[in-house]
Image (cartoon, rainbow, N blue to C red):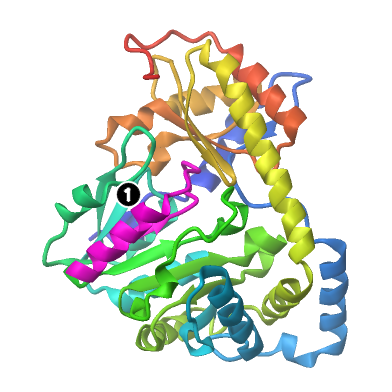
Amino acid sequence: MTTRAEATFRPPVMEARRWLDAAAPPAGLPLLNVSQAAPVDPPPAALRDEMARLVTEVPEVHLYGPVLGLPELRGEIAERWSAAYGGAVAASQVAVTAGCNQAFCAAIAALTGEGDQVILPTPWYFNHKMWLDMSGVEAVPLSCDDELLPDPERAAALVTPRTRAIVLVTPNNPGGVEYPADVVAAFYHLAQERGLTLILDETYRDFDARPGPPHGLFGDPDWPRHLVHLYSFSKAFRLTGHRTGAMIAAEGTLAQAEKFLDTVAICAPQLGQHAALWGLRNLSQWLAGERAEILDRRAAIEEGAGPLARAGWRLTGVGAYFAYFEHPFAMPSDTLARRMVGDIGVLALPGTMFMPEADETGARHLRVAYANVDRDGIAELYRRLATLAYPLAETPPRG
């Protein structure tokens, strides 16, 4: 018998870290770790001071709280999301979760049953695929175009009587691509027409390069019937270890999700919830600076891609924390990624970790998470990649 856990693959980031046990960077060459997108710095000093105060002065942060989250935080999210998206979100339509991954798991638990199907654009976020596997839900891959954009018409052809939801991640992980508002709207209308739910993961929305709202879905008064929105405070306020995310959905959907949340963690960590609330009220200027820094690093990625193209690489997608590259070598990306650790001291994730096994495009791509690498680090990354002298594939990358 195969258990639900055995039905899926090992956690990719942890798997990549094990490569370091087998191969060390060349002598004198420090490791460039571009394998994981989580911030490595702690929360800003002002937030840490507030968290220290909370730990010593607010007894409630050490106790269980409401399963769906701190009421004040739910209300703050509702108010700010309504303003940001030009729509109407009520506090009763907000749940606070132990990170955005848990929000996705709760959404799937609330919306699907054994043997149902969920459409995932590829390359996909691997934890989404893992949870569907462990839930007995079939992940239906939707291949994207050369710009890593999903096609709603192609998605429509994949809908069956067992389809329950379509998942979009924008800005995308792993590709970094920001989905145009009309593309997001087209998927939303497809969900409406077919009686499905659009699960929209906007973990990286704070680092979207566009100045206005990325879509207008919350402006539709009927949005609760067909939309579930996911968000993470891990990236915005560096609260990765405090596991604070959000799920915005119809009250009926949240009532079902509450059952899942209560049996898994009871409530999101209270300290993280209070920290997120304080951050929303006090760190907008600081967050704007973080966004500017990430956008500058994105510019550095784009500027360096031209010279790297002469070595046969192609930048397929870039945005938020990620760059997605097509490599020129006559080896699959999982082999390439392992060899890069010992040969040039770079740890990146292969495209095979974001694609179905049968899809050969995964073998031609690498994901670079550049959020923890400054301009000098990006220049060094490009310098090292350009030194690779492996045999080239017979068919060069497109572009």
User: Does residue 26 appear left or right of residue 398 in this picture?
Assistant: right
**Where does the N terminus fall, quadrant-wise?**
bottom left
Q: Using a 10 Å C-alpha cutoff, classify the residue at mark 1 as few (fewer than 14 neighbours), some (14 to 19) or many (20 or more).
A: many
The span picked out in magenta is 166-193
User: Does residue 375 appear left or right of residue 87 in this picture?
Assistant: right
Work out whether 79 lies above or below 131.
Answer: below
User: Does residue 288 appear left or right of residue 330 in this picture?
Assistant: right
Q: Residue 300 falls in which quadrant of the image?
A: top right
Residue located at (76% from left, 77% from top): 278
Residue located at (39% from left, 26% from top): 364
User: Could you say which is closer to the camera, residue 355 or residue 211?
Assistant: 211
**Where does the C terminus fall, quadrant-wise?**
top left
Residue type marked 1: Pro
Q: Residue 340 falls in which quadrant of the image?
A: top right
Residue 44 spot, x, y in % from top left: 82, 61
Q: What is the number of callouts on the image?
A: 1
Q: Indicate yes or no whether the magenta region holds residue 185.
A: yes
Instruction: Determine which residue is flagged by label 1.
Output: 121
Residue located at (38% from left, 18% from top): 397
Residue located at (63% from left, 25% from top): 303
User: Could you say which is closer to the camera, residue 276 or residue 289?
Assistant: 289
